[in-house]
Amino acid sequence: MASLVGQLVFTLENANGYKVWEDPAFIKWRKRDPHVTLRCHDSLEGSLRYWYERNKVDLSVSKSAVWDDNAVQAALDCAAFWAKGLPFVRSLSGHWKFLLASCPASVPKNFYDVALQDSEWETLPVPSNWQLHGFDLPIYTNVVYPFPLDPPHVPADNPTGCYRTYFHIPKEWQGRRIFLHFEAVDSAFCAWINGVPVGYSQDSRLPAEFEISDYCYPCGMDKKNVLAVQVFRWSDGSYLEDQDHWWLSGIHRDVLLLAKPQVFIADYFFKSNLAEDFSYADIQVEVKIDCSLETSKDSVLSNFVIEAALYDTESWYSSGGHIDLLSSHMANIKLNSFTPRVDFPGNVLVGKLEMPRLWSAEQPNLYTLVVVLKDASGLVVDCESCLVGIRQVSKAPKQLLVNGHPVVIRGVNRHEHHPRLGKTNIESCMVKDLVLMKQNNINAVRNSHYPQHPRWYELCDLFGMYMIDEANIETHGFYFSGHLKHPASELSWAAAMMDRVTGMVERDKNHACIICWSLGNEAGYGPNHSASAGWIREKDPSRLVHYEGGGSRTSSTDIVCPMYMRVWDMVDIAKDPTETRPLILCEYSHAMGNSSGNIHKYWEAIDSTFGLQGGFIWDWVDQGLLKEGADGIKHWAYGGDYGDTPNDLNFCLNGLTWPDRTPHPALHEVKYVYQPIKVCLVESTLKITNTNFYETTQQLEFSWVVHGDGQKLGSGILSFPLIKPQTSYDIEFKSSPWYSLWASSSVEEMFLTITAKLTHSTRWVEGGHVISSTQVQLPAKREIVPHVIKTRDAIIVHEILGDTIQISHQNVWDINFDVRTGAVESWKVHGVPVMNKGIFPCFWRAPTDNDKGGGESSYYSRWKATHIDSLVLTAKNCSIQNITDHLVKVAVAYIGVGLGKEGSDSELEKANALFEIDMSYTIYGSGDVIIECNVKPNTSLPPLPRVGVEFQLEKSMDKIKWYGRGPFECYPDRKAAAHVGVYEQTVGDMHVPYTVPGECGGRADVRWVTFQNKEGVGIYASVYGNSPPMQMNASYYSTTELDRATHYEDLIKGENIEVHLDHKHMGVGGDDSWTPCVHSEYLIAPEPYSFSIRLCPLTASTSDHDIYKSQLQN
């Protein structure tokens, strides 16, 4: 029978055209049952020594993360490292012989034969994706399949990779059974050993294992074994793998040889049942034994002994000097002598652990479980081990509980993505992800949307990260194909879907970090999901089931888990008395480009509404790939950059970090809303709350600092009693250490910043790391009055020369106005050109990704439809209103008309006007220029991008200092993390290099700003009168250029620095990126606005703070 099936599998097509890779009912052949990751230890001591070394991973490892071409060798080194210390595991990673055929029919005949000459073949590193080594093209799609939707058929043009490599079986493996283990292959593959077919498998993200004992040459022979693998880019399995990421193919995880004794431990399932008061845990380990044909299952228990034990891993590192690993023994787990369970035919071991140290993301306490198989004489025959955590996941009304606590999910979604390697993993890069996540207060990760590398789970166990493990099932492209029956309801797809779920659970079941199993993502809903949910609940009732499909509230999910739900709708569900499940957003805050606005609104609701328990941001990393450009430099590439069609352009760039894990500015906001120490000022009481569920504030140092009008007034260490989890400490204002500063100060505004720092180093950060930092504005001591300047009686010289008004004071400064345009032609300070074009009203911004989302209803489309993007300002009149020896006042009236408007008659032009603007400039002898601007938009316009002014500065004015929010990029709806202070940067550093350019680099709530050259000459700008703080931006790239370029590397610097000072600036949004969803309070309605700005010249001897203070009324 085996030979018949083998003939069927490895015949590319039979007489009637049958293709095995197009049969959803045929998903595997000779593939062993799924199981936990096997280590194949030779002894108990060896297993403990392995974990002693394996667990020594911390912040330092992340510093060796590589993202360029060096990652290719790093991946090979890493694969070898993962097998180190395992005498019966061998990695086959390395450079294999490779040939890419255009389709299965073009594969060289009998390419798997031992005698085949492959010396002319090219080489390819394994693991890798072949598209990232010059073979075939990467394809990025979000929803649509990259081939015609005709299930289960795939294109005849189906690139097929042919791999060959060679290996010996070590003589030390004599008499053992040999297994060939593929960690993951995309998308389907066949394998041969020495010309004999040994297996077939699908599922691009789970292991496939085949026994090859009978097909290998005997141990110790010089003759090399030949492993040949044929990988299909497309298979029927591809229909279940339509995730939002790059389509990449090949053997992208490690290939291993495992050697096991004739009778061995094949699988084991660790379970713990905690006492109600958590004082002890009943332990159970289900063990499956695999017997050779010569050994009957009935004789196993009479000839072998199965034992297990728990060891305390923490004690290994807390003791100095010699480490006695065996002394860390904590509990024995013995074979249950009771009647075998009906639901588990294997062997059940039981034990008890007193006073267990519980695992949580805050306190990731782990034990090492070792399972040993001994023969009748007591000799170790086989040994397996893994890290385990004692913890309890349960449900309560509207709550998910971990160890009895309703932990809050501060999560992100994470694709496996490396910009050079694609889907191939490196340990240091995974550690880098976890280090960054932990440092930014992220405590949970959703494996989107497939099981990830086995080491990822061990690292999450160690670092402390709650996890949703997700099955490799997504059929998003079926959403637009109503004529096809959905796989979720098709019996023909049932086995394949179930296999992906069971394979995930069986491989990952012993990991403490996993609190939920997910049935997949965006795969509709049907009986196949119900069946999978039922299987999981029977197999593992210790965890919850998660699935968003079908509306996020079906019977197949224990959590209401919507994606991109609006805040008000979340609150409605949480308050629905008929809904007893907690709501945790499986995806929210779409971080595409300059995004993540409004996230604080979500957390205001989550922190204050029972039944809301957090969510997972979409997503962690921009999925850009390294691609060499015409300039010979490698840049981030997105969909379409490889000539791939169809594609979804830059929709793969949704991360909180760039592909090399450089954080986006938005990650600051995430850290802030996720911070566990909350500080708020309620009337006269400062409340400091520890929102942790397990950690006290014992390991934190609290400090305070007070600033007044941007100047530091005082600081100190805060000493108060330890704050227990879920409790607060109150500081009364009058008894606080900063009260005397407040009481004696005459500043206009005063800010208090409370910071909590770690006093010690952890696995993921060094001591001194800021966990939480909150700034609150202290009460004003007096009424804030409008700003005015105190002018000096300096003499002004003015002259009208044709269309130019020249105004100056001695040789200190001079300004030229063009009366035709109402613009400043030039502004010089001590003869140095400072401004050479401006000052114009401005209402347009280079669109962000979120601005473009929504098709015809997008903000961008509506702006273009009303010609805001092509606004032409015409000066209707420009006149001198007042002239004295000490001031000149110039008034300009503009009409703004879109280029698309017709008509030249003045009345017609006024009727078509998008904006009417009246501006006045009052120039004082001191050099101060007060700009008053009155804007009247056409009420038919959509929400405006901005309302402000722009001007061009000389390129040398590149040193910026401002008093406002910072130091990083922030916008009106994403500024909670940005403290008000005085900051300094260069123009170049202000720019944020989003892969797709757009509006960027803004700073919110700016009171004043200076632009100076290296000699200190420049210009000062501030709010004036009753005007509120402004949004400020300065860039070498014009708004037009940021709109034009499609890649960062395409940007061309202008001749000047373009500066924007905005009275109003629209939020960036972020609830999603495909509908216009900036919250109403951050939209700019087309209604009249009035604001004032002060400008004045600067020299090196000028104090910006003094200038600002000079306009404050005491």
Image (tube, rainbow, N blue to C red):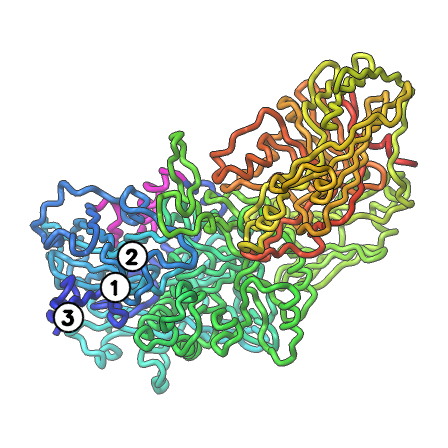
Find numbered disc 3 in the image and state the secondary structure of the residue it sits on. Answer: helix
- Queried whether the magenta region covers residue 79, the answer comes back as yes
Front residue of 376 and 674: 674
Residue under pointer 3: 5
The residues colored magenta run 68-96
Among the two numbered marks 1 and 3 on one chain, the one whose residue lies closer to the N terminus: 3
Front residue of 363 and 27: 27
Residue under pointer 1: 201
Among the two numbered marks 2 and 1 on one chain, the one whose residue lies closer to the N terminus: 2
Q: Look at the numbered discs 2 and 3 and tell me whether their residues touch, using CB distance below 8 Å.
A: no
Residue under pointer 2: 185
Q: Residues within 10 Å of mark 1 (few under 14, many from 20)?
A: many
Residue under the point 28% across and 61% down = 40
Q: Amino acid at mark 1?
A: Ser
Q: Look at the numbered discs 2 and 1 and tell me whether their residues touch, using CB distance below 8 Å.
A: yes
Task: Spot the residue most to the left.
Answer: 115
Q: Position of residue 2 (x, y in %)?
A: 13, 71
**Mark 2 → mark 3, Cα distance in angstroms:** 22 Å
The quadrant where residue 808 appears = top right
